[in-house]
């Protein structure tokens, strides 16, 4: 874990505890790396509910409710898919804030529309729906996945810290 990730995670932990935010993750190309980073923090069970690793399209559908239509028309690496993943994790967990990631980490699997390094990330909360961001990361598979983890965590911090998404506490 990089020093930047450690700093972001410590800030995330502090903010989540202060504001009673519970987080869940829904991951494809990162394969659970975001959840693993979070659970590396002692005491994260106070603010982290669960992580879904939904690498296959079938698992995205079964575990998170991503629709056949979205996968057929937009593909697994798309704003629509990560939005449905984040919303599905929100609906199926005790979280008040979720993050989801899907991308092409490489070295293969890229296309002219979605080259290697293409990653979509979504964040969702109870009150204000979701928002998505597109990234085109550089480097090998490990670098793409690591950058995706950093941006996912950075976005969680921003969601809480800047009130970009107002989170509702579930009781």
Image (spheres, helix red, strand yellow):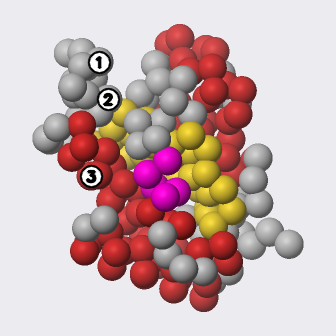
The structure residue drawn at horizontal position 51% and vertical position 30%, both measured from the top left corner, is: 55
| Relative horizontal placement of residue 147, taking residue 125 as reference (left or right) | left
Evaluate if marks 1 and 2 touch, with contact meaning CB atoms under 8 Å apart.
yes
Residue 137 placed where, x, y %? 20, 42
Evaluate if marks 3 and 2 touch, with contact meaning CB atoms under 8 Å apart.
no
User: Earlier along the polypeptide chain: callout 3 or callout 1?
Assistant: 1
| Relative horizontal placement of residue 78, taking residue 58 as reference (left or right) | left
Main SS of residues in magenta: helix
Q: CA distance from mark 3 to mark 1?
A: 18 Å
Residue 45 has which mark? none
Q: Quadrant of residue 50?
A: bottom right
Does any portion of residue 124 appear in the rendered image? no
Residue 109 has which mark? 1
Classed neighbour count for the residue bearing mark 1: other residues with Cα under 10 Å, few (<14), some (14–19), many (≥20): few
Residue 94 magenta: no
Dot 2 lies on which element? loop
Of residues 32 and 134, the one nearer the viewer is 32
Residue identified by numbered label 3: 147
Looking at the rendering, the stretch of residues picked out in magenta corresponds to: 32-36
Residue 104 has which mark? 2
Dot 3 lies on which element? helix
Residue 35 magenta: yes
The structure residue drawn at horizontal position 32% and vertical position 29%, both measured from the top left corner, is: 104
């Amino acid at each position: 874990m990089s020093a930047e990730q450690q700093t972001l995670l410590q800030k995330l932990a502090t903010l989540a505890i202060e504001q009673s935010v519970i987080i869940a993750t829904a991951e494809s190309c990162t394969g659970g790396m975001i959840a693993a980073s979070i659970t590396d923090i002692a005491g994260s069970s106070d603010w982290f509910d669960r992580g879904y690793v939904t690498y296959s399209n079938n698992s995205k559908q079964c575990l998170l409710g991503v629709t056949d239509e979205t996968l057929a028309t937009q593909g697994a690496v798309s704003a629509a898919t990560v939005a449905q993943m984040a919303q599905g994790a929100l609906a199926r967990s005790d979280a008040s804030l979720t993050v989801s990631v899907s991308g092409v980490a490489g070295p293969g699997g890229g296309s002219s529309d979605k080259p290697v390094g293409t990653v979509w990330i979504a964040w969702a909360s109870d009150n204000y729906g979701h928002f998505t961001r597109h990234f085109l990361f550089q480097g090998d598979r490990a670098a793409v996945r690591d950058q995706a983890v950093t941006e996912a965590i950075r976005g969680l911090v921003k969601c809480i810290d800047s009130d970009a998404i107002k989170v509702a506490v579930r009781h």
